[in-house]
Amino acid sequence: MKKRALITGITGQDGAYLAKFLLSKNYDVFGMIPRRVNQSYSNLDFLQITNKIKYVSGDITDLCSVQNCVKSVRPMELYNLAAMSFVGASWQQPVYTAEVNGIGVVNILESVRNHAPECRVYQASTSEMYGNNWNEDLTQNEETPFRPRSPYGSAKLFAHHTMINYRESYGIYAACGILFNHESPIRGKEFVTRKITDGVARVKKGIDKRIELGNLDSRRDWGFAGDYVKAMWMMLQEPEGKSNEYVIATGETWSIREFLDRAFSTVGINSWEDYVYINPDFIRPAEVPHLKGDPTKANTELGWKPETSFDTLVADMVLADMIRYEGSYNGNQSRNLYYP
C-alpha cells in the first residue's frame, strides 16, 4: 500500500519540491489548500506535478478545518510547511504571523493527537529562531540557545517548543527541521535572493535600471530547496524515541554583496554598484546580521548532505529568470535548476 502524505503549504516553494520528491518515492500526496477564488498553482505547474496531487480544502488557523482534513486523508506523514514566511512582513502583520506560524501548529498537533495518532509530523522550524546567538566559531547548531529577533522567529519558536511538548507528553512522532535559508528558481520575489536574480534579469533585459535593497552586509547560509526537502523526509524515517531536531544547512555563509557579485557576473556585469540602490525603508527594526548552520548532526545521523553549491544555485536562479523574460538564454548553463 502506498504511503499517504499530507502537505500544508503545498503551493509554496518547499511544498512544491517536497511533493515532487514524495511522488518520486511513490507516495499518495495530498495538499491542504485554503479556499481562494484565484488559488495559484504556478510552483506546482513549474515542476509539472499539479495534476498528480490530491487536494483537500483547509485553513491552518481553523481547528475544525484541520481536523476535517486529517480525518479525511488519514495521513501516515504530515509535513507542515504552511506559514507566513516572509520575515520582513511579520513586523507589519505580527498577530496574523502568530496565528499561522504558532497557533496553526497547535491545531495540527491536536488534530493528529485525536484523529491520527500514528501519523508522523514534520514542522518547518527556522534559523531565524536563533537571532543573534551563535557559538565561538560563529555557527548555530541544535544546542545553540534561541533568541529570535522578529515576530516570525518568535512564532516559529513557540511552534518548535510545542512540537517537543506534544512528543514528550503524548508520544506523537514530532520532528523539527531547523532549516537555514534555502532558495530556488521558484522562490517568491519578496525574498532578497529572488528579488536580486529577478532584478538582474530585468536590468540585463533593459526593463529596469536598478534594484532596491536594504542591508547588503547581512550574511546567510544559503542552500537549494530541492536538497533540503529530502532532509525533511529523512527525519520522518528515523526510529521512534529519537530527539528529532536537526539543523539543515550548508555550513557556509555568504553576504548579500557576494550574492550580488555572483548574480550580476552570470549575465556578464562585473561592477554592479550603479545598479543597486540602498532603500532605508527596507532595513528591519531588529536585524539579524549573521546566520551559519552546523549540519553535523544531520550529516552523521541522517546521512544528509547538500548537493548544490552556492555558485550553482545563484547562477541557475538568474538563468531561470532570464529564461522567463527572454524565452531562452545562452549563458553559462552548466546545470540548470530551472528545468524539472
Image (cartoon, rainbow, N blue to C red):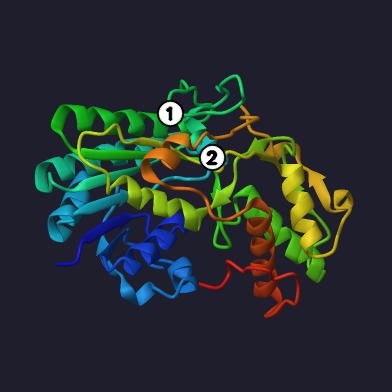
Instruction: Please name the amino acid that badge 2 sits on.
Output: Val
Q: Is residue 281 left or right of residue 157?
A: right
The residue at 56%/49% (across/down) is 223
Tell me, yes or no, if residue 213 can be seen here. Answer: no
Which percent across, then down, holds residue 255?
Answer: 71, 40
- Few, some or many residues within 10 Å of mark 2 (<14, 14–19, 20+): some
Marks 2/1: CA–CA distance? 21 Å
Residue 304 placed where, x, y %?
A: 43, 47
Left or right: 56, with 203 as reference point: left
> Vertically, is 147 above or below 317?
above
The first of marks 2 and 1 along the sequence is 2
Above or below residue 294? Residue 144 is: above
Element class at badge 1: loop
Count numbered badges in the picture.
Answer: 2
Indicate which label's residue lies in the foreground, 2 or 1.
1
Q: Nearer the viewer, residue 59 or 289?
A: 289
Residue 142 marker: 1
**Which residue is rendered at x = 21% and y = 61% of the image?**
4
Q: Are marks 2 and 1 in contact (CB under 8 Å)?
A: no
Q: Residues within 10 Å of mark 1 (few under 14, many from 20)?
A: some
> For residue 156, what is the image quadrant?
top left
On screen, residue 36 versus residue 313, left or right, reads left
Horizontal and vertical percent position of residue 106: 25, 37
Reading the image, the residue beneath label 2 is 87
Q: Check the image and report above or below for 32 versus 106.
A: below
What SS does tag 2 mark? Answer: loop
Dot 1 amino acid type = Glu
Spot the residue most to the bottom. 327
Q: Residue at x 48, y 58 (%)?
A: 226
Image coordinates of residue 2 in percent, x first then y, are 19, 66
Q: Is residue 292 visible to us here?
A: yes
Placement of the N terminus among the 4 image quadrants:
bottom left
